Image (cartoon, rainbow, N blue to C red):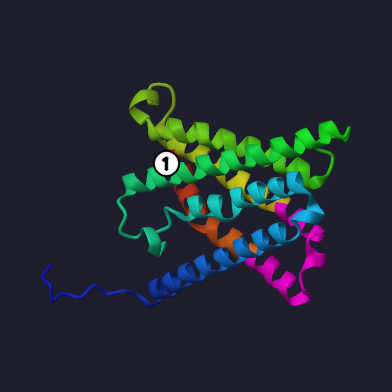
Amino acid sequence: MSSTDKIEVSLLQRILWICNMFYYQILAIVSILFLWIFFDQANSFGSTFTLHLVLSTAAYIPLMAAAIILFSEDNMITLYIPRTKRYWIHGGLLLLSCIFVTIGIAVETDSKTKHGRDHFVSKHAILGLVSWILVFASIICGVVAANTRTFSRFIRPVFAKLVHNFLGLAGFSIGVASLWEMLGHIERYLSDSAFIGLKYGLAFVTIWSGLAAIKSLFGQVKGVFS
């Protein structure tokens, strides 16, 4: 291809790129808004609960959201990054996310133990625990999928990727559902318009993050049964 050749870009592709950049702006706004509330109201929440909120929320928004959308063909940020490097970035973000949510759950569980309160009785807590288990399992499957030469004798690479993808999506979705259950506790600290914006922003980030992964999931299902 000569330097004078032009690459045709469809209108749909341009729209998807614009939406992707819009996605990152919404992701940043939602993340900052969450963190602003947590730190601004730290005295009301208490240091332990604030740490739980910060780590558990950041694990999903923005870390896991960014990890999931990394392989989207419309992701402008990683458009020219080789796929092998994307695997490392994806794994690093997912591992950091798992560490954050692990510590976040641990500090809150320890606090409840000290105060003699029951564990994992609310919808928020149960969903968070289920999400953590799925994310942890997803990382294990991800390690298997990334080392096909070692594990190909025991499991088909496409199946390992399918399980990793499914568990990751499920863990992310359930984790966001846990955040959604918690929104009622922070509504008082926002204006009505800001709270509505936060809810719609969180919904948009969740859906857009998973679209490419869902598309990849269907392709992996076909690969398993082909």
Which residue does the image show at 65% across and 59% down from the upper left?
35
Position of 21 with respect to 186 (left or right) is left
Q: Say few, some or many: other residues with alpha carbon within 10 Å of mark 1 (under 14 / 14 to 19 / 20 or more).
A: few
Q: Does the magenta stretch include residue 120?
A: no
| Residue interval drawn in magenta | 179-201
Q: Name the residue under label 1.
A: 223
Name the amino acid, label 1.
Gly
Which residue does the image show at 77% across and 74% down from the upper left?
191
Q: Is the magenta stretch mostly helix, strand or loop?
A: helix
Q: In which quarter of the image is residue 39?
A: bottom right
Which residue does the image show at 57% across and 33% down from the upper left?
137
Where is residue 147? Give x, y as percent. Answer: 37, 30
Where is residue 133? Give x, y as percent. Answer: 64, 35
In which quadrant of the rendered image does the C terminus lie? top left
Where is residue 110? Give x, y as percent. Answer: 76, 33
In which quadrant of the rendered image does the N terminus lie? bottom left
Which of 202 and 42 lies nearest the eye of the viewer?
42
In the displayed structure, 61 sits above or below 107; it is below
- Outermost residue on the left side: it is 2
Which of 79 and 216 lies nearest the eye of the viewer?
79
Where is residue 78? Give x, y as percent. Answer: 37, 58
Which residue does the image show at 77% across and 41% down from the upper left?
126
- Outermost residue on the right side: it is 116
In the displayed structure, 47 sits above or below 40; it is above
- Outermost residue on the top side: it is 153
